[in-house]
Amino acid sequence: MMSEEASSAPTFDAVFRAKFLELLAWRRDVREFRTDPIPVGMFERLVEVACLAPSVGLSQPWRFVLVNDVGRREAVRRSFEICNQEALECQRGERAMLYARLKLAGLNQAPVQFAVYADQETEQGHLLGRKTMPETLMYSAVAAVQTMWLAAQIEGLGLGWVSIISPDAVNAALQVPESWRFVGYFCLGYPQHPDDVPALQRAGWEHRHNSSEFITRR
Amino acid sequence: MMSEEASSAPTFDAVFRAKFLELLAWRRDVREFRTDPIPVGMFERLVEVACLAPSVGLSQPWRFVLVNDVGRREAVRRSFEICNQEALECQRGERAMLYARLKLAGLNQAPVQFAVYADQETEQGHLLGRKTMPETLMYSAVAAVQTMWLAAQIEGLGLGWVSIISPDAVNAALQVPESWRFVGYFCLGYPQHPDDVPALQRAGWEHRHNSSEFITRR
């Protein structure tokens, strides 16, 4: 019985494995977008793929809010600018100068913009798994985002996560239900400069550390 | 300049796209593991791949705590059992009977077990991007988990996320720094029954909804 089931499971060869690693290596947090539109129906297809992500109790709490209204986009951009200015004021000396030069969001160019929320009161999943750790609802939405990020990269599209922003300001601009918790605001489009090195590393802000540093044994 | 850079970026063909969708479709939250070990060095390689996930300000706040000590594993299992019993008592009628029959963790069989934390005080990233939304540190760790989940699936390995658990109990069992925030406890090993349908769906607990339900326009 087991071997029969197991035999129907797909296997992944060395070619796929290598290509998957390439996908991860070239997935960037994109801040410089071309302004040309993405294909019709693409956003919906990416959401469909994202919905294959794991979710606590199969609750699928993720909510994608596509923002096309110019006024709402402007309100979001204003919140980013205010928060980014405040963040700059917290940096000191050379770090502050470096910070001021960083491009941290593609809100002026990205053709597609959307917010991701987690519905904290969804009945889907019948509360399973989220009693002790309700934050798993937000974590499920993040798993969907990372899945969508990879799916977008396969299509040559880049995604940028804007977190320097006031959730209250975004909520007010988008008028979503009160039970929805803001997870992030995203820019989507074709990247101006595909790269396999993170933008913050290229700018000298930070570099990736060796993965062995992140493992502890108990 | 741009086209030169763009031309060095890898493209992904229809074969890879189809295989990637298969990978997502067969990625399960596994609760039934075989007890045979995973290859030596595999865990470390999966963590290395996970570290290609996006992180706020390139902070890489994820911390992987590999748990081999029998006593610590037992403390974690005890916490799951207590929390699972409490969760059962919150379910009513037929749902309670169905809940009692679900297998919700592979803590007795999984050869590899680890906790994932987010270091809320890491200096890496120099605080960039996390001032307004400090929860992005935990979200970064979740993006790493989802990346690792897919990398494991490519190797034929299954991952199970245990969220029915007390973070305080796990923290006490694993004695981690106070600045580390618990994200989840994970079981890793070869799945007994690979499947492309979620276990909770097979058990009649919940089913996946159409992705169009999760899109709102503003």
Image (tube, coloured by chain):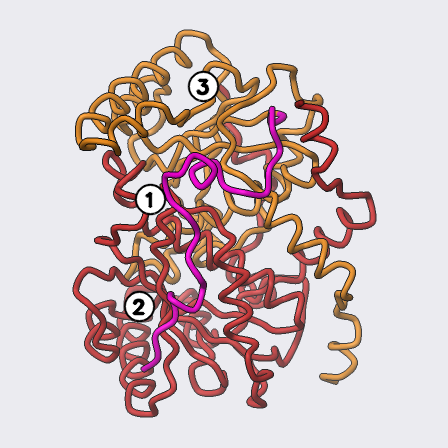
Chain colours: A orange, B red
- Picture residue at 52% right of the left edge, 70% below the top: B159
Are the residues under marks 1 and 3 on the same chain?
Answer: no
- Image height of A75 relative to A97, above or below: above
Q: Which residue is mark 2?
A: B87
Residues A66 and B62: in front is: B62
* Residue extending furthest toward the front: A94
Quick one: label 1, few (<14), some, or many (20+) residues within 10 Å? many
Chain of the residue that carries numbered disc 2 in the rendered image: B
- Picture residue at 34% right of the left edge, 13% below the top: A75
Give, as a single range, the part of the protein colored magenta: A190-218
A128 displayed left or right of A196: left
Separation of disc 1 and disc 2 at Cα?
28 Å
Kindly report which numbered mark, 1 or 2, lies closer to the viewer in this rendering: 1
Q: Which residue is mark 3?
A: A107
Secondary structure that dominates the magenta span: loop
Q: Which residue is mark 1?
A: B136
**Residue B153 sits in quarter:** bottom right
**Residue B141 sits in quarter:** bottom left
* Residue extending furthest toward the top: A71
- Image height of A129 relative to B58, above or below: below
Residues B210 and B45: in front is: B45
Q: Are marks 1 and 2 in contact (CB under 8 Å)?
A: no
Sequence-first tag of 1 and 2? 2
Separation of disc 1 and disc 3 at Cα?
19 Å
Quick one: label 3, few (<14), some, or many (20+) residues within 10 Å? many
